[in-house]
Amino acid sequence: MNKHCIVIHGGAGTIQRNSMSPELEKQYRQGLTDALVAGNAVLEGGGTSVDAIEAAIVTFEDNTLYNAGRGSVFTHEGKNEMDASIMCAKTGMAGAVAGVSHIKNPIKLARAVMDKSEHVMLCGKGAEEFAKSLNFDFEPDAYFFVQQRYDQLMQIRDSGKTQMDHTAADPKEGQKKFGTVGAVALDRYGNLAAATSTGGMTNKRFGRVGDTPIIGAGTYANNKTCGVSCTGHGEFFIRSVVAYDVSCLMEYKNFTLKQACEEVVNKKLLRLGGEGGLIALDAQGHAEMVFNSEGMYRGMKRAGEEFVLGIYRD
């Protein structure tokens, strides 16, 4: 029997101790713990890696601190457009949704695309129609309204710029976070799975979609190599096909998981000017939480071991 493990992230970016109150840090750590507890409970009970990462992501999507689901940032038009994806390494199947609104848990819809359709990605109104056909939970605009998120939009809406998620209420403090949540798990049957969910960028326009719902860019899982979930400036991660690139280095160049993650995040992405990070787990249970930013909300729980939580680089 394999030793199961789950790794999670809640976004990377400019996350500094001097701008984080003890109470806020406590809340973020509790959010990470809640996700690990939910995912680990599935694994402990003999559940699959796919079920475990879905359970973990749902806790993030229900937590307004994280830019996913209920805590999603606002578009230029004052709406929430959410993206999510999930991939099962055992079957090679994947599902994703992009630009959806009013869906309480986008990760559940991505899972449904994988399990209950012949497609990989559905977007916008079409994805929502698919959700209605399956009697998914829809929520009104008020459910997704978080005052801090709306204030962030008001501060830059007329600037023509987009903005990453913030860990502080005042963006003048220089705090920016790539607001994405993700999870990767290895179950007792030796199967990997990966998932990612996000509300995207504040003030985004024209239906902008980042790397999160793109299989191979923001999410990827392969039992021969690894499972990966990314967080960062999506355009760079799309152009670099980051998640798949980590897997390719392992499969075709015999890199270890650590070598592959370091090569992609701290060399390739940095050369391009891309900031962010990723979590990864291989089929032997080796885990990596790598980022080139000042911090990344992250955590890990192995069978029989203590929780590992982190926010800052040190």
Image: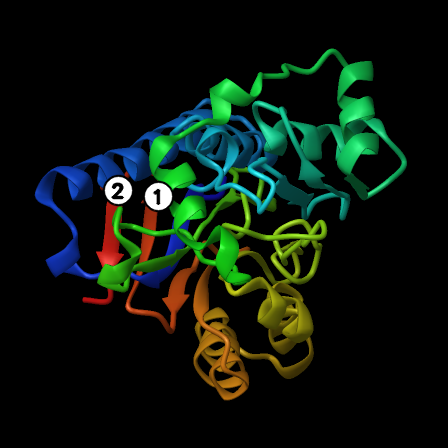
Q: Position of residue 226 (x, y in %)?
A: 58, 59
Q: Position of residue 237 (x, y in %)?
A: 60, 68
Q: Quadrant of residue 251?
A: bottom right
**Mark 2, other Cα within 10 Å: few <14 / some 14–19 / many ≥20:** few
Q: Quadrant of residue 101?
A: top right
Question: Which structural element holds mark 2?
Answer: loop
Question: Which numbered marker is on residue 56?
Answer: none
Q: Nearer the viewer, residue 26 or 245?
A: 26
Q: Position of residue 46 (x, y in %)?
A: 51, 26
How is the rendered protein coloured? Answer: rainbow
Question: Which structural element holds mark 1?
Answer: strand
Q: Are marks 1 and 2 in contact (CB under 8 Å)?
A: yes
Q: Residue at x 69, y 15 (%)?
A: 136
The residue identified by callout 2 is 305
Left or right: residue 195 versus residue 159 is right
Left or right: residue 113 versus residue 171 is right
**Mark 1, other Cα within 10 Å: few <14 / some 14–19 / many ≥20:** many
Q: Residue at x 50, y 51 (%)?
A: 157
Residue 129 lies, with reference to residue 36, above or below; the image says above
Which amino acid type corresponds to the residue marked 1 in the rendered image?
Arg
Left or right: residue 299 versus residue 18 is right
Residue found at the very far front of the displayed protein: 158
Which amino acid type corresponds to the residue marked 2 in the rendered image?
Glu
Residue found at the very far top of the displayed protein: 135
Q: Quadrant of residue 215?
A: bottom right
Q: Nearer the viewer, residue 196 or 37?
A: 196
Residue 270 visible from this viewpoint = yes
The residue identified by callout 1 is 302
Q: Residue at x 37, y 41 (%)?
A: 151
Q: Nearer the viewer, residue 265 or 89?
A: 265
**Disc 1 to disc 2, how far (Cα)?**
5 Å
Residue 8 visible from this viewpoint = no
